[in-house]
Structure formats: C-alpha cells, structure tokens
Image (cartoon, grey):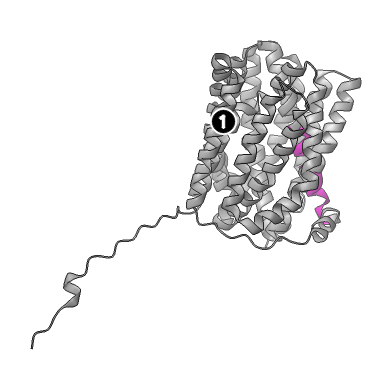
Amino acid sequence: MTVHNHRFLNLPHWSFNWRLPGLTGLYLNACLRNFSIAMVNIFIPLFILKTTGKIEYIFIFYIYYHTFLILLDYPLIFLMTKIGPDISVLISNLLLGCYLFSILLMKQNFSFIFLAALFSALFVPLYWIPYHLAFVKLGKEEKYGESISYFSILGRLSTALGPVAGGLIIAIFGFEKLFMAVVIFIMISTIPLFFDRFKRVSKAPPLDHVLRGLIKPDYRDNLLAFWGVSLESLILAIFWPIFIYKVVSSYKIVGLISSLGLLLSMMMLFWVGKRVDRKGQGMLKVGVLTNSVNWLIRIFLTSGWQIFLADFFYNLGAALLWTPFDTMVYRKAIDSDPFDFFIKRELSLHIGGLLASLLVWFVWAFIPNWFVIFSLGAVGLFLTGLMIKNIHKVLDK
C-alpha cells in the first residue's frame, strides 16, 4: 500500500508582520510632523504682524483659538472614540492644512483669522489625545523618561531642520510655497500611524466627571503647572520670534538661530534620558531656574550671536525641564485614569492659554516693555515646577 506524504508538496507558510513594533509608528509620525510644523510655526506670528502691522491681532488669534478649544475639546474627543485614533489623526492633519491655508487667505481678507483659529482648535485634540494614549499604551512605564528623551532627540533633530528650511523657502519662494510644502509633509506623517499597534480607544469619561476633577484640591497643583506651561509657551511663540527679527531683520537668520540652538543641545537629551527616571525632580528644578534667568537676561541681547547663545543655553535648560516634566505627567496619568487625566490636561492648558492671552495683551497694552514680557515667561516656568508636588506619592506605588 502506497502511503502519500501530503506535506511533501506543501509550500512554506510565509507571513508578513505589517505592524510596527512598540512606539516606532509614533516616532516616525512625530519626526515628520515636527519637521513640517517647525518649518512654519516660528514665522506665523511674524506673518500676522507683517500682514496687519499690529501685534494686537496675534492676541486676537490666540484668544479665539483657546476659546474654541475650551468649547470643542470634549466633543472632538468623543468623536475620536467613535472614529478611532488613526482616522482621528488623519482628519487632524487635514484640518491643520486648512488652518495654514486660512492663514494665507488673511492677506486678502483679515476676517479669515476667525476661520484660522477655528481650524487650529479643531486639529489639536484629534491629534494629541490619541498621541498621549498611544504613548501610555505602547510605552514601558518604568522607562517613560528614557522614551520621552528618545522622542525629544528625534523631535529636536527634525524640529531643528524645520526653521532653517522654512526660512530659506520664505526667502526664495515666499510664504505661500512654504505653506504648501508643510501641508504635503504633514499628510505624509499620517502614514506610519496606520501601521502601529494602537487601534482602540476606550469610552471617554463623562464630561461632568472631568469638570469636577479640574477643581478638586488634589489636581490644583497640576492645573497651575499647566497654566504655567501655557503662559511661557505664549511668550515663546509670540514675542521671541518678533524680538529675534527686530534684532537681525532676516527670516533666514531667525530660522538659522532657532535650528542651531535646537541641534547643538541634542547631546544634553542623551544625558538626561539616562538619568531622568531616577533624578527627574532635581533636573526639573535646575531647568526651571536656568531658563527663568535666561528669560530675564534676553532684554540685553543686541546681536545675532548673543541671541544664538541665549537660545542655545535655553535649549539646554529645556532638556532638563521638559523631559522630567513630561515624565511626571505620564506617571500621574498612569496612576489615575489616563483618558480622564489627558482630557483634564487639554482643558487646563487651554483655560490657561486663554487667561495668559488676555493677561499678556493687557500688560503689553499698558506696559509695552520687553523686560516685563520676558519676566512673564519666567513666571510661567516657576509655575511648571508645581508638577513636582505629590509626585512622590506616585513614585512610591
């Protein structure tokens, strides 16, 4: 009797694992997206100022932006839970493109500032909430600081190339071509997220639960710390590019200074990344102190070389400050309900952003003094130090 070996003709079973491991998809997306946004971000306040001739319109934009976000954050997050994180990020990037085109249209009709602020507000939660939830899901809790450091290194490399590329494109081709290039890169940045392993988002916590959490005593220090982030970020986004341009009068030099300062400070992130999970609180305190002093001395800068040095040392301090700060944020999120915590974080940042916009506009209207404005940046940094409060309770668990 003949015995047939059916396995003899079987072909080997080939399979292709098309999912990216760990945080790879997030890393790739962050690099491409950071490069895209960095090409244009530092120049937008200058563009609005050049178009209108009045700094007040920049404040109007930020007031609209933060107001829309406070109103739309939760509805957009609820939408994200229905459509999934990948589609959410894709829509976010499309809205980011609409925002940039609205900025361009302000040259023809300044009423587009309203639409630009709306599109800007719409794309933020649709991107950042999936981003943070994916980081918590795919990252290793005991090495969040190291992972954040790697993110920062890759992000800083891509962000460092952005401003100088953007400055050159503006100088040669103009703002319109720069905005189109940015939109193309942003859409490409979406692709890696469709190959990662983070596909599901849990149900959003009830809005009334989130709002009650914002005013609880045990969240107060976090709230003030996020308000500090918003205040310092506003000064950095509006006044620092204008101050640089006032001194050097060149888009190319503005971009070059920003790029070199970021690029040369990258080695600090390697050092911080290896130590932040053990010594993060001390690093944050040093970063707050050094960068607060940095803000206070900027009024004395009178040349491009001096501005470059100040920006370089600021970025060294930023590595010491923001890597441990973000690590503490993720650990506090893990210690509670991450989804609930990140929604509260978004609302805290934008309530703080609205208050900061009104405060800084008021101060600039009555005391248009660079030292006073830069001092507000230092005040914002001191508030961020409150993130340390109660972190020992999380670390001891």
- The answer to which image quadrant residue 233 occupies is top right
Label 1 Cα crowd, 10 Å radius (few <14 / some 14-19 / many 20+): many
- For the question of whether residue 286 can be seen, the reply is yes
Identity of the residue drawn at 65% across and 40% down:
95
Tell me if residue 285 is in the magenta stretch.
no
Tell me if residue 229 is in the magenta stretch.
yes
Residue that extends furthest to the right in the rendered view of this protein: 366
Name the chief secondary structure element in magenta.
Answer: helix
Above or below, comparing residue 342 to residue 239 in the picture = below
List x then y, in percent, for residue 240.
71, 23
Identity of the residue drawn at 54% across and 39% down:
187
The answer to whether residue 234 is left or right of residue 12 is: right
Identity of the residue drawn at 86% across and 54% down:
215
- For the question of whether residue 31 can be seen, the reply is no
Look at the image and tell me in which quarter the C terminus lies.
bottom right
List x then y, in percent, for residue 346.
74, 47
Above or below, comparing residue 102 to residue 273 in the picture = above
Above or below, comparing residue 89 to residue 141 in the picture = above
Look at the image and tell me in which quarter the N terminus lies.
bottom left
Instruction: Give the camera-side residue of 59 and 300.
Output: 59
Which residue lies under the disc numbered 1? 182
Residue that extends furthest to the left in the rendered view of this protein: 1
List x then y, in percent, for residue 76.
71, 51
Instruction: Give the camera-side residue of 307 and 62.
Output: 62
Q: What kind of element bears circle 1?
A: helix
Disc 1 residue type?
Answer: Val
| Magenta residues (range) | 218-233
